[in-house]
């Protein structure tokens, strides 16, 4: 049930038609976030491969990015925009939280999304198609595992009633942590080229930097921070993979 709740929460596909999920299950969706990455990253890789049969790689990769945006409903990108707005325009903890809760996007959010999408689109285009397909799936799953650890290191920054999703995630049990780790690392074991493995360190490093920022400025995290954490971890994965590939 928790995995079904994760599919419902992290995608816009009609999984809610399968069965009604108790509200309590949505507090335990984060450990299954990397497993949902098998679906979202798999769709991304599949669209990339299919589109590349008829289109240049740059256009095929753009279609793959759009496909994931449609599947997830831009959930994480919305969080990234709010994250940039909050930390760009807020000078105090209270002000940052207030800005992040505002549904309107500001200058920092717009600028942040532009630079993010430009980097995401342009960075991996020097890679071969087969490698980029593998990175699309591996980067999604592994970066979601790294980002998911935020709930184990920081408390939620707002009262549950003030949460946008009206839910506060529970910390992971040992079993949930194992589930998240296995879900995140399995695609790497089967798909990631051996010489690209050092790129897996980049999301962990990005996680630690953002975690330190959140601990210093917010003393906690929000759902927007989770989405931003994932996308920035993933972007660091692509950046490091491209650097390694070009030096190899």
Image (cartoon, rainbow, N blue to C red):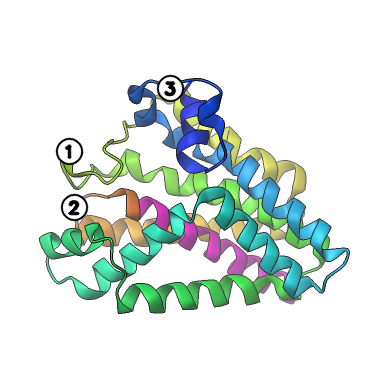
Q: Which quadrant is the C terminus positioned in? A: bottom right
Q: In the image, 170: left or right of 5?
A: left
Q: Residue furthest right?
A: 53
For the residue carrying disc 1, how many other residues have a C-alpha within 10 Å: few (<14), some (14-19), or many (20+)? Answer: few
Tag nearer the camera, 2 or 1: 1
Provide residue 165's location: percent of width, then percent of height.
31, 42
Quadrant housing residue 239: bottom right
Tag nearer the camera, 3 or 2: 3
Q: Which mark is residue 51?
A: none
Residue bearing mark 1: 161
Whichever of callouts 3 and 1 sits on the residue coming sooner in the sequence is 3
Q: Is residue 88 above or below residue 27?
A: below
Q: Is residue 184 above or below residue 213?
A: above
Residue at 37% across / 58% down in the picture?
A: 79
For the residue carrying disc 2, how many other residues have a C-alpha within 10 Å: few (<14), some (14-19), or many (20+)? Answer: some
SS at mark 3? loop
Q: Is residue 242 magenta?
A: yes
Whichever of callouts 2 and 1 sits on the residue coming sooner in the sequence is 1
Work out whether residue 33 or residue 173 is closer to the camera in this orientation and state it.
33
Residue bearing mark 3: 21
Whichever of callouts 3 and 2 sits on the residue coming sooner in the sequence is 3
Provide residue 168's location: percent of width, then percent of height.
27, 36
- Asked if one can make out residue 218 in the rendered structure from this viewpoint, the answer is yes
Q: CA distance from mark 3 to mark 1?
A: 20 Å
| Magenta segment | 225-248
Residue at 34% across / 25% down in the picture?
A: 23
Provide residue 233's location: percent of width, then percent of height.
49, 59
SS at mark 1? helix
Q: In the image, 190: left or right of 185?
A: right
Quadrant housing residue 22: top left
Work out whether residue 30 or residue 240 is closer to the camera in this orientation and state it.
30
Residue bearing mark 2: 219
């Amino acid at each position: 049930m928790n995995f079904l709740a994760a599919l419902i929460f992290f995608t816009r596909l009609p999984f809610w038609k399968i069965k009604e999920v108790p509200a309590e299950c949505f507090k335990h969706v984060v450990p299954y976030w990397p497993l949902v990455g098998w679906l979202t990253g798999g769709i991304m890789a599949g669209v990339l491969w299919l589109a590349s049969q008829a289109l240049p790689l740059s256009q095929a990769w753009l279609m793959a990015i759009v496909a994931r945006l449609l599947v997830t409903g831009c959930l994480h990108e919305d969080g990234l925009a709010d994250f940039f707005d909050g930390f760009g325009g807020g000078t105090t903890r209270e002000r940052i939280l207030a800005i992040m809760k505002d549904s309107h996007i500001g200058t920092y959010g717009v600028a942040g999304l532009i630079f993010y999408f430009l980097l995401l689109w342009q960075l991996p285009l020097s890679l071969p198609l087969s490698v980029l397909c593998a990175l699309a799936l591996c980067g999604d799953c592994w970066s979601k595992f790294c980002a998911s650890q935020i709930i184990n290191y920081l408390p939620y920054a707002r009262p549950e009633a003030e949460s946008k999703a009206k839910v506060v995630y529970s910390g992971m049990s040992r079993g949930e942590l194992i589930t998240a780790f296995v879900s995140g690392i399995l695609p790497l074991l089967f798909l990631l080229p051996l010489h690209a493995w050092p790129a897996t360190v980049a999301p962990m490093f990005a996680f630690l930097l953002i975690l330190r920022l959140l601990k210093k400025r917010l003393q906690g995290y929000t759902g927007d921070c989770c989405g931003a954490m994932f996308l920035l971890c993933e972007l660091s994965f692509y950046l490091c993979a491209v650097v390694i590939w070009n030096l190899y």
